[in-house]
Amino acid sequence: MASGTGLINNEQMMSYNLLWDYPVCSIEIPERLSTSYEKLKYYGLVERCIPLSVREATEEEIMLVHSLDYIEAVKSTASMNIEELKTFSYNYNDVYFHPNSYLCAKMSLGATLQLVDAVMLSRVRNGMALVRPPGHHSQKSEACGFCVFNNVAIAANYAKKTYGTKRILIVDWDVHHGQGTQYTFEEDPSILYFSWHRYEHQQFWPNLKDSDYDVVGKGRGTGFNINIPWNKVGMGNADYLAAFLYVLLPMAYEFNPELILVSAGFDSAIGDPEGEMCATPECFAHLTQLLMPLANGKLCVVLEGGYNLRSLSESVCMTVRALLGDPVPPLVGQMVPCISAIETIQNVRAVHQQYWNFLKYHDSVFSKDSNTKKLNLGIEEGNPESNDASNAEEKKLTMISEVNQDFDEFMDSHMKKVLVLAPPARTALVGCGEKLTKLDQCLQVEEKKITLEEVGILISGGDCAHLKDENLLLSLGKIFPLIDKITKREVRNGVVVSPTLSSGAFAARYSTTVGASKVLLLLLGEADIPTDVKDDEKILVMQIYGKQDVKRQSNYYIPICWKEHNELDGDLLYALFGFILPLAYEHQPELVILTVGSNIGIQAVTLAHLTHLLQVLSEGRILVISQASDLVETLISSLLGDPTSAVRPFVLKQENALVLVKLRQELKQHWKLLQNSIN
């Protein structure tokens, strides 16, 4: 099994710079690499990574995307003087050349391919390549936007040719549209390309109609090109998260990639002069961790843009922390996407709906205008949902102004809040048996005797009937000591086997008495929940089971009563991205409790993905209570951060999907991150 995070950095890629006055290119400087690497060293991250060597790419490799004539033209710059370099550079759009540009471009591409080799050959699990020049704007015969050779596009074709990789996901979170990558693969169904980018109705560079949401690919590649055009500045953590949850992740899971390549441009982070966005560095740790369960963990992150050195370096470090498996800090700010982001997401989902099963069922099924292809949406007067999103937009624009006044001071304060330490132990077990293969990687916690009186004080007298179950007290004797360890940050997460699912509700109530201000309780299976837990707004309860007569009693106890109960893997993933995670992110729990019943119609591999993805919450503090002992091995492996196998092909059931659509309609006025459309 592959382990470790690869890191590629080489000073030679800093050996070119702008040699004349050319303001549009003045922000692309060698310090982009040196500052990022020094910050990685400052946080002690370099020594935790596996260093990978750098080589020059060959002409044959470059020709996987670029023409020979173009390669020869770039090669000729090595012998040019400054005036010749200026003339040559001005043949292209927003790019400059230096006598070392050709060498550095070959090194940048070679480093990217070295990372792909290391991941595909299981020398490392994942990794990051700090490279320049960047690549995603360059096309077959054209340099563009600081980019010479398209590193990620070539890497995708290289993986297909060298390793026979059949499905590759490219995630481009740079603030500029990677049109070079899009053009390379617009007719290729083996590449799913996702890009969000500042667009402003075609008023932002590269000012292309091809960057809009309705450009979805051509021919056999139709539906495999996803553009998220941001039409306003100030997009923040909630907006980026909404794009992942409502667009990228459902499509990525349906696509089922064998390799993920990230065009990691951090000009989409707060403080960057190009992007003017509000996403804070820890947001990129969340994005990275949300991708990691896919492709058996084969994830290659390749640097693109990023021009505020402080924002760039902190965001690079947060990304590497996630690759290493460190706990990700909670996202700051209101979890309310702005109105412009919601409009864009709804348009993208509508235009891709015909190509992806996961997008077939959404809020527009309850709208009179559900057949409208292009949705020209605006703020509706008196609509509280629209007003909330509008207020979020105004707050983010104010934040940009305040941050720009003294960015370093802001970042010093912010990073102190979000830098979290990993507990001494990652995963703990109580009473799970002695034959587990990963027992030596876990902390064993002793159970203790719990009295009726100790549990009785957690609930009111009317629910004391629960306490007559002797198995419940025995289970809580295992659960409470583990919760103590987690809340004291002595261990990050843990697993307990319990014959009764009701123990999850008591565990949630106990957690609020020992330090967890908010708890998420996710129940998979039937269990009676005490009224005190249902009424406690500190505890968000979501319960998936088959009773048809269970009514939602509050905004914090949400029964998901599915109509069909066989092979629920697709339904669970659909619920996770479109419902569970949005509510959970907005609730911001300090502990997640997942209870898993037996015979619930969900495969072990899907539960592994669920468990992995829930660790983006509450700094990874999650307690898993399993009714089935045969699931423990899978659950432990996921909690330890091991790569998860690909989910098997699944079917999304219309009746179950529409249950969630209806619930979202009912709840989105209270839970703002549920808004993925405006009706």
Image: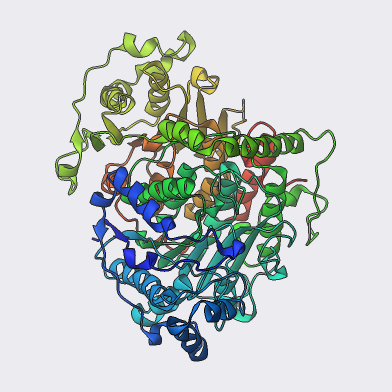
Q: Is residue 167 visible?
A: no
Which residue lies at the image location 42% right of the left edge and 45% below the top edge? Answer: 314
- Number of disc labels: 0
Extreme-right residue of the structure: 381
Which residue lies at the image location 27% right of the left edge and 62% below the top edge? Answer: 124
**Place of residue 560 in the rendered image (x, y in percent of width and height, measured from the top left):** 56, 39
Question: Quadrant of the image for the N terminus?
Answer: bottom left
Left or right of 64? Residue 375 is right
Query: Is 210 in front, or is 445?
Result: 210
Q: Colour mode?
A: rainbow
Left or right of 635? Residue 358 is right
**Place of residue 263 in the rendered image (x, y in percent of width and height, measured from the top left):** 48, 63
Which residue lies at the image location 40% right of the left edge and 68% below the top edge? Answer: 258
Left or right of 559? Residue 214 is right
Which residue lies at the image location 76% right of the left edge and 33% below the top edge? Answer: 384
Left or right of 406? Residue 528 is left
Q: Quadrant of residue 388?
A: top right
Query: Is 470 in front, or is 61?
Result: 61
Give the answer, above or below, for where 556 lies relative to 24. Answer: above
Query: Is 670 in front, or is 233?
Result: 233
Q: Is residue 101 visible?
A: yes
**Place of residue 261 in the rendered image (x, y in percent of width and height, measured from the top left):** 44, 65
Q: Quadrant of residue 339?
A: top right
Query: Is 172 in front, or is 614?
Result: 172
**Place of residue 532 in the rendered image (x, y in percent of width and height, measured from the top left):** 50, 17
